[in-house]
Image (spheres, rainbow, N blue to C red):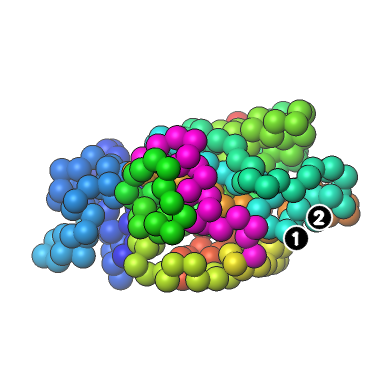
Amino acid sequence: MKLISFLQGGRETWGAVVDHQVFDLGRTTGIATLAQFVGSDRFAQRDALVKGEKPVALYDDVELLPVIPQPDKIWCAVRNYMDHHQEALAAGLQRELSEFPPLFLRTARSQTAHRAPIVRPRVSETLDWEGELAVIIGKGGRDIPENEAYEHVAGYACYNEASVREWQFHAKQIATGKNFESTGGFGPWMVTAEEIEPGRALKLEVRLNGETVQSSRTDQMIFSTQRLIAYCSTISTLLPGDVIVTGTPSGVGFARKPPRYMQPGDVCEVEIEDIGILRNPITAQA
């Protein structure tokens, strides 16, 4: 099933997309947010909830929100593909591979929805693309064993973890370049976990104005989805709706010679096999 967060009649709600039609399950269930729904007992009834309901809009007509608009946590993995680590070294970033997953946190305000703009801030022209697989937590927990990690996954989405490189490289701590407002594309929807076999390699591709700039598979990650879930849950209790963004492969703009960055007027797409296509126009900060 495909689940989204969206605006309906001026209110925030969430629902299902079936045959390009949107069903307002927030209204049906009385559950306020998608994050609350994926952590509830009613999540198991999601298919039955749609039956007998009438759609409220066509998918193409609704104003989408980031899949989870206000996650408690957005954990992001750094250098989690070997080819990306190697291209960063070649570009002059002298960072050692870690025995443990290197992570940072994004804020909810840094996110933007499918079809909504990714905004290049006025302070920098070094806005780079990073296509990534996002994992949405359903069943919360602390100290989750790796072999139980998939039991805690509600679903998957595409993420463009766009980075303002100039600010990322201000210091060894990279979070400044990762948290500019409306730079983290998140969508087009959440595909629920039963649709994708645990651990299956998914093709990931990023296109800028139709040109493929990244192409890889999720089995090339250094630290697996299970490892990331277990590690993050050791630090802090994972809550329903938390997001783990699993890292990007090679092909980013700053590592190119000469470097290449997203410009206002560009369109960036992140496509992940069996999930969908996240599409964002690039605009300049007003």
Q: Foreground residue, 17 or 238?
A: 238
The residue depicted at 42 percent of the width and 43 percent of the height is: 143
Instruction: State if disc 2 and disc 1 touch (CB < 8 Å).
Output: yes
Res. 155 visible in picture = no
Mark 1 closeness class: few <14, some 14–19, many ≥20 residues within 10 Å: some
Mark 2 closeness class: few <14, some 14–19, many ≥20 residues within 10 Å: some
Is residue 177 shown left or right of residue 160? right
Is residue 187 shown left or right of residue 203? left
The residue depicted at 55 percent of the width and 71 percent of the height is: 201
Mark on residue 257? none
The residues tagged by marks 1 and 2 sit, at their Cα atoms, a distance apart of 6 Å
Is residue 125 shown left or right of residue 204? right
Counting the numbered discs, the total is 2
Residue 132, by quadrant, is: bottom right
Q: Foreground residue, 180 or 178?
A: 178
Membership of 232 in magenta stretch: yes
State the image coordinates of residue 158 (x, y, percent, origin top left). 51, 57
Which residue matches tag 2?
A: 87
Task: Find the residue positioned furthest to the left.
Answer: 52
Membership of 257 in magenta stretch: no
The residue depicted at 21 percent of the width and 65 percent of the height is: 47
State the image coordinates of residue 5 (x, y, percent, origin top left). 34, 48
Q: Secondary structure at mark 1?
A: helix
Look at the image and tell me in which quarter the C terminus lies: top right
The residue depicted at 69 percent of the width and 63 percent of the height is: 214
Is residue 215 shown left or right of residue 59? right
Which residue matches tag 1?
A: 83
The magenta span reads 220-239
Dot 1 amino acid type: Asp
Q: Foreground residue, 113 or 251?
A: 251
